[in-house]
Image: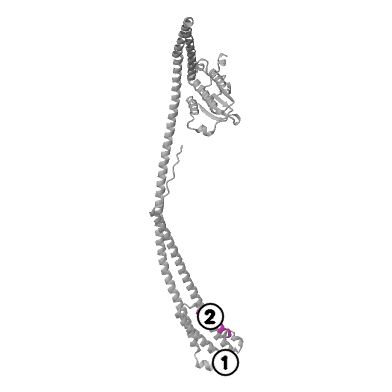
Amino acid sequence: MYFSVEPAPSHRLPLYKTILCVTCALLLVLNGFSLSHNLDTLKSTNALLTQSAKVADRLQYLNVLVLDAESSLRGYFISDAETYLGPSRTATAEIDNELRGLEALLQGSPSQLKNLAQLKTLIRRKMTTLDESINVYKQGGLADIVNIARVSDERATMDEIRLQVVIMVREQNEALDAGSTAFYREYRKAVFLGIGINGLAILVLIMFYQLVRRSFQNRAAVEFALKNANDNLESTVVKRTEQLSVLSRHLISVNEVEKARLARELHDELGANLTSISMDLGAVTQQLAHSHPELAAQLRHAKATLLETVELKRRIVEDLRPSLLDNLGLCAAIESYCEDFARMSSVRCDTDVAIHIDSREATLTIALFRIVQESLTNILKYAKAGMVTVSLKRNETGLVLRVTDDGVGITEDALQKPMSHGLLGMRERALLLGGSLTVKPGPQGKGTCVEALIPLPLTPEPDELEA
């Protein structure tokens, strides 16, 4: 047996649980912002590193371009072959391109732009000197170039260019080192902050887990208590049902005993009294027949009423305890009752009950007879049947009693009605004998079949005993 439990009213999440959830979410969001900030810082540092590498490469390339231009010019002076002037002719354009690239890379550093301006001045001065040397060589030859080299200091200009390149590379490296130091400092702060945030988040999660675990344990305890209560209630209901069933069977037995006692008293005492009254009325009627005919007529009327009373007493006695059941046995009583049923209801009733049952089995015979009696009563009230079949047979396990009709049948709802006292009474009578009773559709699904199975030891028939 299960009991429906109304769902508990929905409640809002407790405030402390909500605060824990929001705190955990905020910590995770804060950690996300921290990670995003670290990523931006790392990108900035990486960009600075890339920029420094590009600046160093362009500076070195500028230095190489100037050296190549100067070396090509020396080769031209020595060999007088203009093919050596190729690097010097293309150097100006390439140097301008590199200077523009450096200027774009160093937009965020004013000091480096100042250094770049100085470098640009030195390089252009050097390139101008190289161009003038070519013109001097073409006009005066190698001797003029030697004279100019004696009085000028071209190597100092190259040293200044190299020095300026070194200064710019060193300053760029210093900026890179400062950026890296700042990045690692911020990174350490971010790591410590992230560790703290994660620690707090883990602590909040542990607290929330404890709350959820405690809530789950409380709910499990409530469910366990509810299950125990339900089990106890089920066992109590089963016990009470069994007690009621035992009480019902006891009341049925007591009722049958009381009916038999009352039937005997009515048959013996009331019957004897009514018979004595009838004989006295008959004697007085004969004496008054000639002297007082009117009184004799009244006495005859009273005797007729007395006979009707005797018949009423007989019917009452038969209802309380069929005399045929005690005198001729169960089969004769069932056949007689079926004949009376067919006569009163105009419903055909066939019987197949030709078996021997010891008449001393009073509990068995009266229970089977009552099942037949109640079944025929229900058929008369509800079935609208045209034919009824009553059979009582013996098999290897016991007795099988079937009452079958071709009526409208019985629904499952009617079988489960708590007020179906007739069906409950028949079941209790079958249980009293250790058997069972089922109500099911009749043959081919038409009508109803009431079947009682009563376990009974297999005993030989009287014909077998005589043999």
Highlighted range, magenta:
89-103
Residue drawn 44% across and 22% down?
Answer: 255
**Residue 396 percent coordinates (x, y):** 55, 24
Return the mark for residue 135: 1
Q: Quadrant of the C terminus?
A: top right
Number of residues whose C-alpha sits closer than 10 Å to that of mark 2, classed few (under 14), some (14–19) or many (20 or more): some
Q: Is residue 53 visible?
A: yes
Magenta-span inclusion, residue 90: yes
Look at the image and say whether residue 202 sits in the magenta stretch.
no
Foreground residue among 171 and 305? 305
Residue type, label 1: Asn
Query: Which secondary structure, mark 1?
Result: helix
Q: Is residue 393 left or right of residue 187?
A: right
Residue 455 visible in this rendered orientation of the protein: no
Q: Nearer the viewer, mark 1 or mark 2?
A: 2
Which residue shows up at 52% across the image and 79% down it?
Answer: 101
**For this view, does 94 lie left or right of residue 419?**
right
Name the secondary structure under disc 2: helix
* Percent x, y of residue 157: 49, 87
Q: How many marks?
A: 2
Above or below residue 135? Residue 299 is: above
Q: Residue 120 at x, y = what percent?
A: 50, 84
Label 1 – label 2 distance at C-alpha: 26 Å
- In the image, 137 versus 431, the foreground residue is 431
Three-letter code for the amino acid on which mark 2 is drawn: Glu
The disc placed on residue 98 is 2
Within-10-Å neighbours for mark 1: few <14, some 14–19, many 20+: few
> Nearer the N terminus, badge 1 or badge 2?
2
Task: State yes or no: discs 1 and 2 in contact (Cβ < 8 Å).
Answer: no
